[in-house]
């Protein structure tokens, strides 16, 4: 039988991925589906696919973004600082590659990813610092320093480049974006469609 896989393209600075992660894990666990995390370079990909970075949007759209974050944190019962001290991080790309290194080793990359996002959006830690990322990994019982070192390995760098190229080719314009077979979903608020698809319901037309 062909393994069923949900691909998740996202960035390690996305509050929406912070909200999505527990839902994604619960849904895929219920249906016995593997999750492939595909972190990508937001500033590189998004200008090519039509997305608009938050900081370059008109002020009314930035204000509405904050309203939505507040609504969703209350709706989901998840703590979140609306304007965390270290957002946007100076560079979220190494954190993405750290998650990829954990995934390549068969470790719990989803737990690491969510811990990094929690560090940024709840604990107000600077995830751009390698020592912070290493400590986050260590707290999960993972080899934090080793994973940080592997962020720059040739294999992880090559996979990172593939993620970016695929994100552009597949039209990824936001974070998180999910693919399951032909199903394409953007945003944590569309995850109920993923559950329907995993249950065998038709939720997408050509």
Image (cartoon, rainbow, N blue to C red):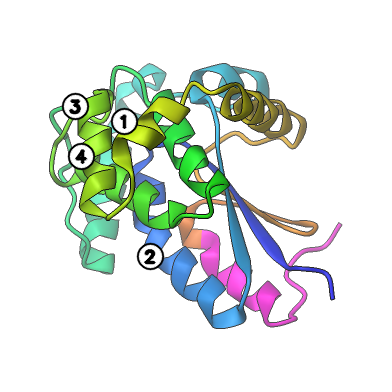
Q: Indicate the secondary structure of the residue bearing disc 2.
A: helix
Residue 200 sits inside the magenta stretch: yes
What's the distance in space between the residues labelled 1 and 3, CA to CA?
17 Å
Residue 162 point in image, percent of width and height:
70, 29
Image quadrant containing the N terminus: bottom right
Report whether 109 appears left or right of 13: right
What's the distance in space between the residues labelled 2 and 3, CA to CA?
23 Å
- Residue denoted by label 4: 135
Q: Is residue 141 above or below residue 201?
A: above
Kindly identify the residue that appears in the image at 27 percent across and 34 percent down: 133
Kindly identify the residue that appears in the image at 40 percent across and 26 percent down: 149
Is residue 1 visible in the rendered image? The answer is: yes
In magenta, the rendered stretch is: 190-206
Question: Along the polypeptide, which appears first: circle 1 or circle 3?
Answer: 1
Question: Which labelled disc corresponds to residue 86?
Answer: 3
- Residue denoted by label 2: 22
């Amino acid at each position: 039988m062909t393994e069923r896989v949900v691909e998740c393209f996202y960035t390690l600075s996305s509050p929406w991925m912070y909200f999505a992660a527990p839902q994604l894990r619960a849904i895929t666990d219920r249906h016995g589906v593997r999750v492939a995390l595909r972190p990508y370079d937001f500033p590189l990909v998004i200008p090519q696919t039509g997305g608009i970075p938050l900081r370059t949007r008109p002020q009314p759209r930035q204000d509405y973004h904050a309203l939505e974050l507040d609504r969703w944190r209350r709706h989901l019962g998840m703590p979140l600082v609306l304007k965390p001290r270290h957002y946007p991080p100076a560079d979220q790309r190494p954190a993405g590659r750290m998650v990829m290194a954990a995934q390549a080793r068969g470790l719990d990359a989803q737990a690491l990813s969510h811990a990094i996002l929690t560090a940024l959006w709840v604990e107000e830690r600077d995830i751009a610092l390698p020592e912070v990322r290493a400590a986050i990994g260590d707290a999960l019982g993972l080899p934090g320093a080793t994973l940080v070192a592997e962020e720059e390995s040739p294999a992880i760098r090559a996979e990172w480049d593939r993620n970016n190229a695929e994100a552009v080719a597949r039209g990824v314009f936001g974070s998180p974006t999910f693919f399951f077979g032909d199903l394409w979903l953007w945003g944590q608020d569309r995850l109920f469609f993923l559950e329907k698809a995993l249950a065998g319901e038709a939720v997408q037309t050509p």
